[in-house]
Image: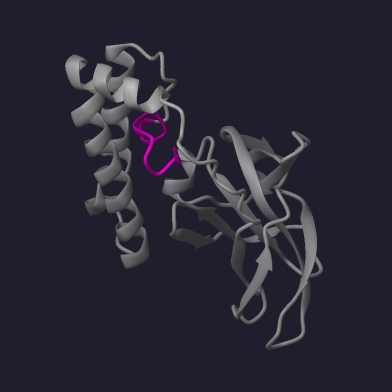
Amino acid sequence: MSDHDDHYAALEVAPDAGAEEIRAAWRFLMTAFHPDRFRDPDQQERAQEITKRANAAWQVLGDPARRRRYDLRRSAPSPRPVAPAGPPVRSLPCPTCATRCRVPDPGGRTVDLRCPACGETFPAMIGARCIGRPRLERRWMGLRYEAVFANARGERSSVSFRRLPQELALSEGELFSIVFHPRRARPVYAIVHGDGLDMGWRVG
């Protein structure tokens, strides 16, 4: 079963979560990702997809009888093994000219990319998982948001943001790519990878 079809994954709860935890997770997602909170059409589209999946999950998991039937189907063995898919291809904007650069996901590692339009070479951390939520910290040059990311091997690294959109304050567990300035070690773009839809913000 893919995450897209998994009602527990849609609500970001464990399969043994209690009824109150499931209800709280559903209400949180409906509040945090209500489409009316977003102005950008792409962001609205992703928010609609998230709330649609959350509502579908709540209709099943919020009903004890339907949840029992769903759990039985969910635990049944798959009739055919699913062949492993290759790494997804990510599309990231060049920090200089914003041209999209396509690259296979390296599993959270930082790699150097070369823009096909302007020829600029720049680093990008691609496909890393956000650990916890970004923390607001006071630095000698002002306030900074500090976020911790993990790659596919579990190795962690932190990224400091001068500013962070409201949507990224709720980014715990999300899959991220960070595009850095070509000559200064600061983030320029932050992209959240969703199910078939990516959302990006300029952060520097």
Return the residue nearer the eye: 200 or 9.
9
Image quarter in which the C terminus is found: bottom right
**Residue 82, position in %: x, y?**
54, 45
Residue at position x 33%, y 20% from top?
Answer: 72
Return the residue nearer the eye: 204 or 148.
148
Residue at position x 23%, y 38% from top?
Answer: 56
Residue at position x 78%, y 36% from top?
Answer: 155
Q: Which residues are magenta?
A: 1-11
Place residue 177 in its image quadrant.
Answer: bottom right
Farthest-out residue, front: 79
Image quarter in which the N terminus is found: top left
Residue at position x 60%, y 39% from top?
Answer: 130
On the rendered structure, is 47 left or right of 197? left
Q: What is the tally of numbered marks visible in this picture?
A: 0
**Residue 44, position in %: x, y?**
30, 58
Place residue 79 in its image quadrant.
Answer: top left
Answer above or below: position of 69 versus 49: above
Place residue 62 in its image quadrant.
Answer: top left
Answer above or below: position of 154 versus 87: above
Answer above or below: position of 137 versus 13: below
